[in-house]
Amino acid sequence: METKRVSIHLEGINTRDALPPTEKTAECLKDAGELLKKGEIVAFPTETVYGLGANALNGAACQKIYAVKGRPADNPLIVHIASLAEVTGIVRVWPQKAEICARQFWPGPLTIVLPKKDIIPDIVSGGLDTVAVRMPSHPVALALIQAAGCPLAAPSANLSGKPSPTLAEHVWQDLNGKIPLLIDGGPCTVGLESTVLDLTGEIPVILRPGGITREQLEAVLGRVDLDCHSGNDQPKSPGMKYRHYAPEGDVVLIHGSIPEKVEKISHLLCKKEDGKKIGLLCLKNTAALMPMDILSRADTLFILGSEEDLTLAAGRLYEGLRYCDKHKVDMILAEEISEEGIGLAFMNRLRKAAGKKNMSDPAKILSRPDQD
């Protein structure tokens, strides 16, 4: 299959503004809408990460998402809408807390889980009686939903398990030749997936931390719990059960105070053996304290951002993981950050990227034979 890549330039456009009515934009959206109406899938930008969309009311179309991504069938999809009016066609109940969240955070990176109507195919909900719904704030995403004339089921537009795509180039690397169309809308502004909030019980529960923080939700809802999912049950949200966001190299998490992290990173870099490549993902505050002769031993260095702006740092995590993949590193030393605010989502993704590998002995990782 040939993948067509079309760019929609958004320079100077606020993410909540409507798209400029240019001929190229109109043609792109018309073509994309027609593909979706025919049951095809389209990759498109959102403010969080790039999504791989299909008509959420068409089970056969949504099956293509699972096939292209290699996604487990019990991992539910998020349904994207363009207006609050569309909610009534998707969910059976719309509680007051959902109304509060929608008025406060939509459009934006918040997904709400509620009992679904039968119009939502089981493949979209992972066989559950609930559906995850959100209204993205990206102008291309909103315009695409309107052009398709239906809600779009859309997980991240990457191969299952890989770091999520925050640039169109990331989608191209994973899905070129597997989908008919990629809409390039530039970099994603949030860079982490949406927060998934379960409102099916009395107390709201965050199933997946994301772009809307726990603190923001508690400011309008009161008590909000964090999910304690065992990992063995059927997940109610994407990102709960399976290993996600994983680069090719082994991820070693570096924790502690900044001086302690500098010491640990320096120790591992000094132990590096010939033929093994190390990538370093860290804040500029940490890098600034490292001696240049030691810092230069890292084969790749990706500065996430600064301790003073952790929102920016969190939004660059996936780009950093993919940067390390591009340079084929054997081990990634990844700096942990505080779990307050957006740091909760950052560390959730970083731990999933590491999986069980963060328990590995770094010395063994560096000394094992190369594998083809």
Image (cartoon, helix red, strand yellow):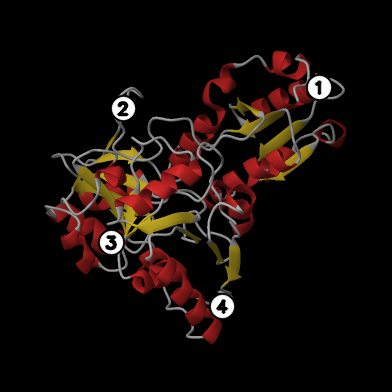
Which residue is disc 3 drawn over?
A: 104
Which residue is disc 1 drawn over?
A: 272
Q: What residue type is labelled 4?
A: Gly
Which residue is disc 2 drawn over?
A: 228
The residues bearing labels 4 and 1 have C-alpha atoms spaced at a distance of 45 Å
Q: Earlier in the sequence, mark 1 or mark 2?
A: 2
Q: Which of marks 2 and 3 is nearer the N terminus?
A: 3
The residues bearing labels 4 and 2 have C-alpha atoms spaced at a distance of 42 Å
Q: Is residue 14 visible?
A: no
Q: Is residue 162 visible?
A: yes
Q: Earlier in the sequence, mark 3 or mark 1?
A: 3
> Where is residue 130 drawn, in percent x and y?
21, 43
The residues bearing labels 2 and 3 have C-alpha atoms spaced at a distance of 26 Å
Of residue 82 and residue 217, the one placed in the foreground of this image is: 82
Residue 8, above or below 99: below
At 75% from the left and 22% from the top, the residue drawn is 371
